[in-house]
Amino acid sequence: MKTAISIPDPVFEEAERLARQRGMSRSELYARAVAEYIKGERLVGVRERLDAVYGAQTSNSLLDPALGEMQARSLPKEEW
């Protein structure tokens, strides 16, 4: 679908630079950016509900610290 949008010049220029750098069209860059934004917004309600259950502070969690440590050690190591 075609659409027309208005964005600030500096944002447009950075988007143009990034699209060229990544070897993609402007349309592909904008479509990917909007898709990522939508994906992130879907998680907003989940985060809010988890914060309501566990609180913003980890000290508010009812998870036993020893159990949390065991769970963390059971996860495979990943490089970031």
Image: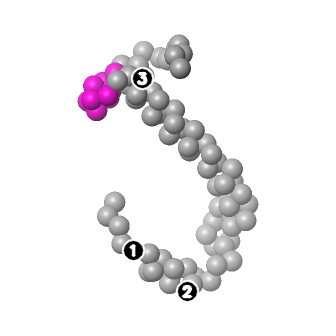
Examine the structure image and report whether residue 18 is included in the region drawn in magenta.
Answer: yes
Front position in the image: 59 or 26: 26
Residue 15 visible in rendering: yes
Q: Residues within 10 Å of mark 2 (few under 14, many from 20)?
A: few
Amino acid residing under circle 1: Pro
Q: Which residue is mark 2?
A: 66
Answer above or below: position of 65 versus 33.
below
Q: Nearer the viewer, mark 2 or mark 1?
A: 1
Q: Which residue is mark 3?
A: 27
- Residue at which label 1 appears: 76
Mark 3 lies on a secondary structure that is helix
Q: Which residues are magenta?
A: 16-24
Q: Secondary structure at mark 2?
A: helix
Q: How many marks?
A: 3
How would you rate the neighbour count of disc 1 (Cα within 10 Å): few for under 14, some for 14-19, many for 20 or more? few
| Left or right: residue 43 compared with residue 4 | right
Amino acid type at image mark 3: Ser
Magenta span: chief secondary structure: helix
Residue at horizontal 38 percent and vertical 22 percent from the top: 26
Q: Which-is-in-front pick, marks 3 and 2? A: 3
Q: Position of residue 59 (x, y in %)?
A: 63, 73
Q: Is residue 5 visible?
A: no
